[in-house]
């Protein structure tokens, strides 16, 4: 007896491999997938300014990166002794405003370079609810008083317009949209359902209008295939590791080949070996182990000459062999 309704996913006719580069933007769920991509040797940059959730914040952040538009000192705000930008994550905050400017602008520059080289753009949407301050959409409220912000639900038309803009900025790249399975309960379960529906309708319209855009059903996998709280964390809102791993397996089926998987397994084994902390790092046994790993890494570097991950593995084991 089958106790699950497994979703049938139409494979993407275009495939991601270790020759290519991926740029990811959106919710924290995107960052989970980015970690998996990096582990199997696919060069990926995720959210240079931090996690984003609604289409307008994603559009604004991507535009800043694409235009290489730096932040200025007068754009910062101060709460207590911490300076920050409403367009960046709290990890950039600092008591020194110049440090905030430099770290955010360094990340923008890194994002600009990565986006220019990317073959794929993966966009993960989380909510259609936006927060505004002074009429401007913010990416992060930085725990400022709620009274300083207004919030509203985007319309389907607004969401479509923002995502259309994202696709235009990604001209010449393949675009994959996903919808985060994380439930945002600030407006209750009913509000979460309405928000997700707006995003799903907007994605459907945009994908139908653009040959270079497609949709991966991460949200539907959780909603129908993994209809069980075992696949959520202790907060019952965010996916558990088991849930993320299952979605990753389906993502591999969706846009990768068996050869990519095989190469990815070798990248992953080498990454594990690099992270291993030996008991006797100066022993001959460890030196022989590193030499074996060096040979495997060099094989990958020859196969993927423009892959920085392969090059870093070669360098690591060469210095220890």
Image (cartoon, helix red, strand yellow):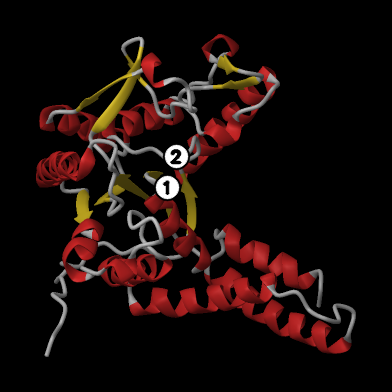
Task: State left or right for residue 148 relative to residue 8.
Answer: right
Task: State left or right for residue 315 relative to residue 298.
Answer: right
Q: Nearer the viewer, residue 230 or 200?
A: 230
C-alpha distance separating marks 2 and 1: 6 Å
Q: Which residue is mark 1?
A: 118
Q: Position of residue 108 (x, y in %)?
A: 53, 31
Name which residue lies at 11% across and 46% down: 204
Is disc 2 in contact with disc 1, using a CB cutoff of under 8 Å? yes
Q: Position of residue 66 (x, y in %)?
A: 42, 30
- Quarter of the C terminus within the rendering: bottom right
Q: Position of residue 250 (x, y in %)?
A: 28, 70
Image height of 50 relative to 321, above or below: above
Label of residue 282 in the image: none
Q: Which residue is mark 2?
A: 116
Q: Quadrant of residue 148?
A: top left
Secondary element type, mark 1: loop
Name which residue lies at 26% across and 67% down: 254
**Can the viewer see residue 198?**
yes
Label 2 crowding class (10 Å Cα cut-off): few <14, some 14-19, many 20+?
A: some
Name which residue lies at 66% across and 67% down: 313
**Can the viewer see residue 107?**
no
Label 1 crowding class (10 Å Cα cut-off): few <14, some 14-19, many 20+?
A: many
Q: Position of residue 19 (x, y in %)?
A: 46, 62
Secondary element type, mark 2: helix
Image height of 106 relative to 194, above or below: above
How many labels, in total?
Answer: 2
């Amino acid at each position: 007896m089958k106790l699950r309704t497994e979703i049938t996913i139409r494979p993407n006719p275009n495939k991601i491999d270790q020759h290519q580069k991926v740029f990811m933007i959106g919710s924290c769920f995107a960052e989970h997938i980015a970690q998996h991509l990096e582990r199997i040797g696919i060069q990926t940059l995720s959210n240079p300014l931090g996690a984003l959730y609604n289409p307008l914040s994603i559009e604004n952040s991507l535009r800043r990166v694409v235009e290489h538009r730096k932040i200025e000192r007068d754009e910062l705000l101060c709460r207590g002794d911490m300076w920050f930008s409403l367009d960046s994550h709290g990890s950039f905050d600092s008591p020194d405003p110049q440090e905030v400017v430099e770290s955010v602008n360094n990340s923008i520059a890194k994002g600009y370079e990565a986006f220019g080289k990317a073959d794929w753009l993966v966009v993960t949407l989380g909510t259609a609810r936006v927060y505004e301050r002074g009429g401007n959409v913010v990416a992060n409220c930085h725990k400022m008083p709620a009274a300083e912000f207004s919030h509203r639900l985007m319309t389907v038309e607004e969401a479509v317009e923002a995502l259309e803009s994202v696709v235009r900025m990604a001209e010449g790249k393949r675009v994959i949209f996903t919808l985060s399975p994380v439930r945002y309960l600030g407006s209750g379960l009913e509000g979460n359902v309405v928000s997700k529906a707006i995003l799903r309708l907007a994605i459907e319209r945009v994908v139908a209008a653009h040959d270079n855009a497609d949709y991966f059903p991460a949200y539907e996998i959780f909603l129908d295939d993994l209809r069980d709280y075992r696949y959520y964390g202790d907060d019952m809102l965010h996916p558990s590791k088991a849930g993320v791993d299952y979605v990753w397996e389906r993502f591999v089926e969706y846009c990768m080949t068996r050869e990519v998987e095989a190469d990815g397994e070798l990248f992953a084994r080498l990454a594990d070996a690099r992270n291993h902390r030996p008991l006797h790092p100066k022993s001959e046994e460890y030196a022989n182990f590193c030499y074996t790993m060096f040979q495997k890494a060099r094989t990958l570097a020859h196969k993927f000459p423009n892959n920085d991950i392969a090059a870093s593995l070669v360098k690591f084991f060469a210095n220890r062999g």
